[in-house]
Image (spheres, rainbow, N blue to C red):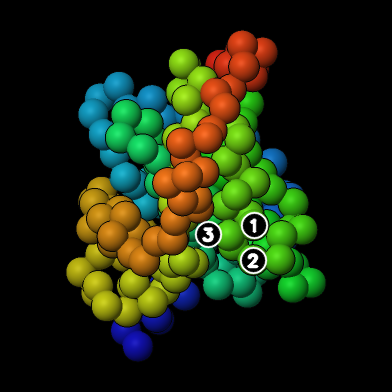
Amino acid sequence: MQKSLENKNILKSKAFKKLARLNSPKKIQDFLDTIPINKERGGETCTSPLVTLRHNKAHCMEGALVAALALKMHGHRPLLMDLKATPGDYDHVVTLFKKDGYWGGITKTNHAVLRYREPIYRDVRELAASYFHEYFLDNGRKTLREYSEPFDLDSWQQKNQHDNWISSENDLWDLGAALDSSKHHKLLNKKQIAGLRRADDLEIKAGKITEW
């Protein structure tokens, strides 16, 4: 109860005034796109929304937390989905939302791909699969392999009272580890993997376009 009351007070603070105006997933995505990408030049980070907004830079996990908080402030459950790639490539984190019974996704990325998804997907597997063809290395090898079940940040918070995912001044490494180790499902089987075609030169070229 104490943590819940603390969060209510935090959400009314000046630090989150911008998020209070973002009353739709589209507006949240537009806002995330204005935040410069966090290239972690000073070392790896996993900051809370409070610290992310203060520093005005975010990578995919940090952006996902900001988006989840904005959704929470407007009555939605703060849900994340982890996309797992093969070794040698990076995982990606998507903030989930639901509209009229269909799933959509908000993301923070520096590239022209792995971006916002309209709420047109019947389940989270469909949504995860929509990222498959855009998930490849510079040699064209397609790498997306697994997706997590919706990960509820508030449920995680109830079990981890020591770190507040909304306003912690410390990096949220425990949260990142919990998401990574949460229940995941395979997107494709061994036979499908063996038959994959590599992305072509034009796709690879388009995939190298960056925003920041």
Q: CA distance from mark 3 to mark 2?
A: 18 Å
For the residue labelled by badge 3, is the local secondary structure a helix, a strand or a loop? helix
For the residue labelled by badge 2, is the local secondary structure a helix, a strand or a loop? loop
Of badges 3 and 2, the one in the foreground is 2
Residue in the picture at 44% in, 56% down: 186
For the residue labelled by badge 1, is the local secondary structure a helix, a strand or a loop? helix
Q: Quadrant of residue 133?
A: top right
Pointer 2: what residue?
123
Disc number placed over residue 146 in the picture, else none: none
Q: Is residue 204 left or right of residue 193?
A: right
* Residue 210 to residue 2: above or below: above
CB under 8 Å between callouts 3 and 2? no
Q: Where does the image place residue 208, in percent across and percent down from the top left? A: 56, 16
The foreground one among 152 and 66 is: 152
| Of callouts 3 and 2, the N-terminal one | 3
Pointer 3: what residue?
68
